[in-house]
Image (cartoon, rainbow, N blue to C red):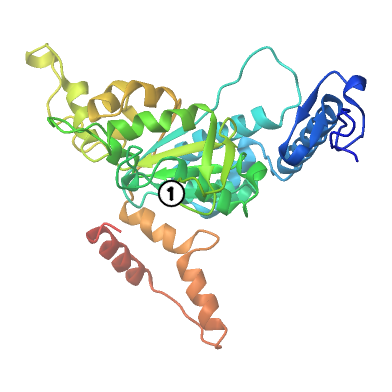
C-alpha cells in the first residue's frame, strides 16, 4: 500500500515512488512518508498562493499622488495645510515603495510618521481619512494600555491583532495596512524612578521590532499566548505606523532650548519671546523629544515628523460648517428627512465654538 513499508520497500504516501527513486524520503506519523520531490511541489504551490494573495492585496490599494491626497483631505479637514502636505507625501512614498515593480539595489526604508499636536487637532482623523482613501485596513491602538511582555496589560503584538481583525482576518491584506498608535507621549521614559519602567521605556523598546519590520507571531482570536492559541505570522515590513500624541509640556522644552543663550543685554532673547507662538511645535527637534523622554532608537524609526496647530475659535466655526461631512450638515440632513429646515445663526456657531474651547473638546 502507498506510503507504507511493505516488503522492506518504503514508498511515498503521495506519489508512490520508492526510496530508491528519490533523493530523500521523510518519515511521518503512523507509517506515512513523503519524498523530496513532493515536498518541492508542495512548497511551490504554497509560494504561488502567497504571491497571489500579495498581488491581490496590492491591487486593492488606491494609490493617488500627494497632490490628490491633499485635495481629498481638504474636503474633510479644515486648516493644518502643512501637516496635510507632509502626511500626503510620506504616505505616498510608503505605498509607492511597496507597489513599485522596479528592481533596485537601494533598500528603501519605511516612512513611519510621528504626529504632534494638541487634543482635538485632528491627528487620528487625518490618519483614518487617508486609510479610507487608500482602501487599506486601519487600526487604532492606545499606547497607555501597553506594557512590557509578562506584565499586566496588553503586549505590543496585540496591536497587530487589531489590524488583522480590521482586514477581516486576511493576514496578507493586513500586512499592507496602517496602524495609528494614539497617546504615544504616555510611554515616555519615567524620570526619577527606582522601579522598572514597564509601561514607558520598556514599551518603546518592544515597539522597535514592529516599527522597523520583522516577522511577529500574533495570537489569533485571543489576547493571550498559550499552547492552545492559534498563531499567525505577520510581516510588518510594509505596515505603516503613525504615532500620535499631545506631548504636554513639550512646548516648554522647545522654548527653553530656543531661549537658552549665553548672551546678555540687548542681544539676548527675552524669556517670553515664544510664549504666544502658535507654531512653537513646528520648531521641535529630536533633541527636544529625547528630553521629553523618547529614546533615540524609537525616534530613529519614525523619520517623518508632522506637527499640527491648536484650534482657534475661527477654525472651530469653519469645522462646524465647511467639511464634506460637517456636523451641521449631518443635522440638517437628518431633520430634512422629517421635512424640517434647520438653520444656524453665525452668533450661535461662535457660541458653540467658545464652549468647545472652554471644555477643551
Give the x, y percent position of residue 27: 75, 31
Where residue 110 sits, quadrant-wise, is top right
Give the x, y percent position of residue 319: 43, 58
Q: Residue at x 64, y 13 (%)?
A: 106
Can residue 308 be seen at all in this image of the molecule? no
Q: Look at the picture and state if 360 lies above or below 21.
A: below
Q: Look at the picture and state if 219 lies above or below 354.
A: above
- Total marks shown come to 1
Residue farthest to the left, as pictured = 265
Give the x, y percent position of residue 95: 63, 34
For mark 1, does the 10 Å Cα neighbourhood hold few (<14), some (14 to 19), or many (20 or more) residues? few
Can residue 14 be seen at all in this image of the molecule? yes
SS type, badge 1: loop
Q: Residue at x 62, y 39 (%)?
A: 176
- 159 and 49: which is toward the camera: 49
Residue tagged 1: 224
Where residue 318 sits, quadrant-wise, is bottom left
- 104 and 321: which is toward the camera: 104
Residue farthest to the front, as pictured = 7
Q: Residue at x 67, y 42 (%)?
A: 172
Horizontally, residue 38 falls left or right of residue 190, namely right
Where residue 283 sits, quadrant-wise, is top left
- 360 and 4: which is toward the camera: 4
Give the x, y percent position of residue 361: 30, 59
Q: Quadrant of the N terminus?
A: top right
Amino acid at each position: 500500500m502507498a506510503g507504507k513499508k511493505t516488503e522492506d520497500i518504503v514508498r511515498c504516501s503521495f506519489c508512490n515512488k520508492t526510496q530508491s527513486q528519490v533523493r530523500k524520503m521523510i518519515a511521518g506519523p503512523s507509517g506515512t512518508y513523503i519524498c523530496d520531490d513532493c515536498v518541492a511541489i508542495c512548497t511551490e504551490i504554497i509560494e504561488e498562493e502567497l504571491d497571489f494573495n500579495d498581488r491581490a492585496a496590492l491591487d486593492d490599494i488606491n494609490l493617488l499622488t500627494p497632490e490628490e491626497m491633499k485635495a481629498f483631505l481638504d474636503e474633510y479637514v479644515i486648516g493644518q495645510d502643512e501637516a496635510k502636505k507632509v502626511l500626503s507625501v510620506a504616505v505616498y512614498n510608503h505605498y509607492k515603495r511597496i507597489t513599485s515593480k522596479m528592481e533596485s539595489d537601494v533598500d528603501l526604508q519605511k516612512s513611519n510618521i510621528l504626529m504632534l499636536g494638541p487634543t482635538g487637532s485632528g491627528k487620528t482623523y487625518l490618519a483614518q481619512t487617508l486609510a479610507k482613501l487608500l482602501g487599506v485596513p486601519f487600526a487604532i491602538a492606545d499606547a497607555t494600555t501597553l506594557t512590557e511582555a509578562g506584565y499586566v496589560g496588553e503586549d505590543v503584538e496585540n496591536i497587530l491583532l487589531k489590524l488583522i481583525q480590521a482586514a477581516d482576518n486576511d493576514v496578507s491584506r493586513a500586512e499592507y495596512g496602517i496602524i495609528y498608535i494614539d497617546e504615544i507621549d504616555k510611554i515616555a521614559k519615567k524620570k526619577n524612578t527606582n522601579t522598572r519602567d514597564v509601561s514607558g521605556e520598556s514599551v518603546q523598546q518592544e515597539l522597535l521590532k514592529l516599527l522597523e519590520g520583522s516577522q511577529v507571531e500574533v495570537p489569533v482570536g485571543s489576547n493571550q499566548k498559550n499552547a492552545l492559541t492559534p498563531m499567525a505570522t505577520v510581516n510588518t515590513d510594509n505596515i505603516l505606523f503613525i504615532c500620535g500624541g499631545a506631548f504636554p509640556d513639550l512646548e516648554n522644552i522647545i522654548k527653553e532650548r530656543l531661549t537658552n543663550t549665553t548672551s546678555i543685554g540687548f542681544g539676548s532673547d527675552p524669556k517670553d519671546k515664544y510664549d504666544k507662538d502658535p507654531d512653537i511645535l513646528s520648531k521641535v527637534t529630536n533633541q527636544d523629544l529625547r528630553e521629553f523622554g523618547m529614546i533615540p532608537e524609537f525616534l530613529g524609526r519614525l523619520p517623518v515628523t508632522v506637527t499640527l496647530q491648536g484650534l482657534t475659535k475661527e477654525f472651530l466655526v469653519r469645522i462646524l460648517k465647511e467639511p464634506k461631512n460637517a456636523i451641521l450638515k449631518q443635522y440638517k440632513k437628518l431633520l430634512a428627512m422629517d421635512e424640517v429646515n434647520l438653520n444656524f445663526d453665525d452668533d450661535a456657531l461662535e457660541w458653540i465654538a467658545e464652549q468647545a474651547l472652554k471644555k477643551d473638546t
